[in-house]
Amino acid sequence: MSQRLRGITDDEATGPAKDLFEASNKMLGRTANLMRILAHSPYVARWILPFIAAVRQPDAGAVSAVRLRNLAVLKTSTINDCHY
C-alpha cells in the first residue's frame, strides 16, 4: 500500500502544526509519522495526541503491557503492508 498523504516536515510546519510537533516531541520524545500526517488537520491532531499518549505512555496512564502494544503495532503494520 502506498502512502496517499505526505507527512509535513519540520521545516514545513508552521502555526498549529509546529505547536503539534513540539507537543509530540515533548510527550513522545519525537515527532511520530502519525503526527506528521495529522498535521494537515492540526486541530483534530491536538485532540488525538493526549489519547495516543494515554494509550502508549506508562507515565500517562497506559495499562497495557509494552509487549502487547508492540505486537499490535507490528500486526497493524503487517496488515497495511508497511515497509518500515
Image: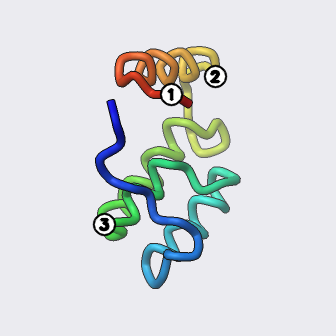
| Mark 1 or 3: the one toward you | 1
Identified at 55% across, 36% down, the residue is 56
Query: Measured from the top left, where is residue 59 in percent x and y?
Result: 67, 42
**Amino acid type at image mark 3:** Ser
**Of circles 2 and 1, which is in front?**
1
Q: Amino acid at mark 2?
A: Val
Per the rendering, the mark at residue 41 is 3
**Dot 1 corresponds to which residue?**
83
| Residue 66 numbered tag | 2
Q: Position of residue 83 (x, y in %)?
A: 50, 27
Work out which quarter of the rendered image holds the N terminus and state it: top left
Looking at marks 2 and 1 on the same chain, the residue that comes earlier in the sequence is marked by 2
Q: Nearer the viewer, mark 3 or mark 2?
A: 3
Image coordinates for residue 50, horizontal then vertical, percent? 47, 53
Image point (51%, 19%), residue name: 74
Question: Looking at the image, which residue sits at the far front?
Answer: 2
Q: Residues within 10 Å of mark 2 (few under 14, many from 20)?
A: few
- In the displayed structure, would residue 12 be above or below residue 64? below
Indicate the amino acid at tag 1.
Answer: His
